[in-house]
Image (tube, rainbow, N blue to C red):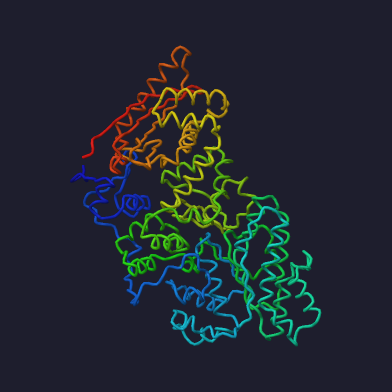
Amino acid sequence: MEAFSVKYMDVRTAASQWELTERRITMLCREGRIAGARKENGLWMIPENTARPMDRRRTKRIRTVEKTANLPLPIGVSDYKELVSGYYYVDKTLMIKEFLDMRPKVSLFTRPRRFGKTLAMDMLKTFFEISDEDNKKYFSDKKIWFCGEKYRLEQGQYPVISVTFKDIKFASWEQTYEALRDVIAREYRRHIYLLDSNQCTEYDKNYFRSVLDGTVSEVGLTGAFRNLSYMLHIHYNKSAIIIIDEYDTPIQQGYTKDYYDQIINFMRNLLSGAFKDNSDLAFGFMTGILRVAKESIFSGLNNLVIQSVMDEKYSGFFGFTAEEVIEMAEYYNASDKYEEICEWYDGYNFGNEDIFNPWSVINYFCNDCFPKAYWQSTGDNSIIRQIVSEADEETADHLRKLMQGQTVCSYVDTSVIYPEIKSNPTTIYSFLIAAGYLKVIRKDELYDGNSICDIAIPNKEIFYVYEKEILSALSNIIPQASAIAIQQAILKQDISKLQETIQKFLINTISCFDYAHENFYHGLMLGICAIMNNLYRVDSNKESGYGRYDIQLTPLNKNLPGIIIELKVMNKDVSEEMIETELKTSAKDARNQIDRKQYITDMKQEGIRKFLKIGIAFHKKQVQMVSEIEENDIE
């Protein structure tokens, strides 16, 4: 018999006591970092005597940097010299030390977009390159300069070839090849002094000119990096460094735009020429989202060291660490916003480091600390839309769990290739981790070099990316005429018209195979609600009151009613005579559940005072709805 009984508090009470967000406490419970926390009826409960948990992101004392005036934030600045000359810079120069301590011949860094890859490569170029300008001034007050003379002596000692493929996003192979040729020609133009070099032969110079004027053949262009590194080597009598930023951007485009084989063949030969058995190469650096090892792009390249999001080395050099974000918040007088920044932009785990999305953090500070999904607009998220539209039942179920804040266990192969994403469910999660759409909470390493991982959505910002793309994919199944009729019925609160329109849609559109799964109806209603996103914020399966509602439409204009929808699906056999009666009973039970679980609690707290509560019941191609309007006086 227990000597005493433990009393529990819910997440909301704990959040008030500890001055943390409810989302942060829920995350700590899921990660097992609050002792004794347990779930009751789907809600986390915490022992009342639990002390405020230590947040490992705040365990280090941060030195406040003294600056005379606030520097501007470097939005979209990826030129290292420009950035350190006039903007706030998060010092990542110790990456140079880590590289020089190990000196791998060729390094590939895979990270999500907008996590500082291009800036990091430009930093390396500025540090290592032989230049008429004295580049020491860009490092003399940085961390690398205080690491010792042996590191300082490496500055300005190598000829450098540096290109970025980040903007090569075209619809055809012909356009892509032309863009690749122009990028390479631009780098040749930067080294045009080689045409006057006494060390280079006329044969070499003729090739050089053919690259500049665009007459080089496609086959000839694949040797561009090898030939340029040779000319630089004999001119300077020093081996060259080759830097290729975002090498896989044109590969992803080739996959989505159906010229995959052509881009793979070209890139295989281009990169092999640069990095495989190249005696004129000092070191090579590449960045990308995927490792793409199975493509045989790096076939036989046994000097390649890959540093992925799963690896511990270089883990703190892409993105912002907690200490860097705290220091930045102090500098911009926003220390009180740290928890909000964590909720929106933290959650990535690179190796052993907690990482924040740097693009979003910078935009957050630049926009008066207003939180929103800044990263969402920086690139094409269509890969999620494609995955959703082609998802099998298991993948769809996992996506729903992820959007409900749950974790999913999956095999993670860090050498995933684009063609496998469509056909192999495990590679879907591998890609989403590499691309920044999922985080690894726990991993068990396997003998094949891969892992079994518990994965989850990193933060609130990425949740909205999923929500937008998933709703977009689902809404595509709703015909335009039906969409207009449904929107008008909701706005007019005409439930009989709404039921009639959805009934007609079910009869004319879906097959018996669709409604074989309960999740079809939930997806259908999400798609229907997606057409309202110009007037409402659409949420699904989130906690409010004493449970999780199915669908909530929070009005962007508070004069509109908040809408809560609860769904029921009847799978039992019912006689034709009793279907309508049974459905109405089930719909009424769904409507009553909204009151019983107090699902409108969150919208009330947002100042919404009028609510449309809808219970919907489905049975195959039939539907019944029961609704109620509730109005509350403003207190």
Q: Position of residue 396 (x, y in %)?
A: 52, 40
Q: Position of residue 498 (x, y in %)?
A: 44, 26
166 over 198 or under it: above or below? above
384 over 570 or under it: above or below? below
Q: In which quadrant will I find the C terminus?
A: top left
How many marks overall?
A: 0
Q: Quadrant of residue 582?
A: top left
Q: Nearer the viewer, residue 364 or 453?
A: 364
220 over 446 or under it: above or below? below
The reply to whether residue 367 is in sight is: yes
Q: Position of residue 215 (x, y in %)?
A: 79, 68
Q: Quadrant of residue 247?
A: bottom right
Q: Nearer the viewer, residue 189 or 339?
A: 189
Most extreme residue toward the top, as rendered? 577
Q: In which quadrant will I find the N terminus?
A: top left
- Asked if residue 495 lies left or right of residue 172, the reply is left
Write the residue at 37% across / 55% down: 343
Most extreme residue toward the right, as rendered? 203
The reply to whether residue 539 is in sight is: no
Q: Nearer the viewer, residue 451 or 345?
A: 345
Q: Position of residue 182 (x, y in %)?
A: 69, 66
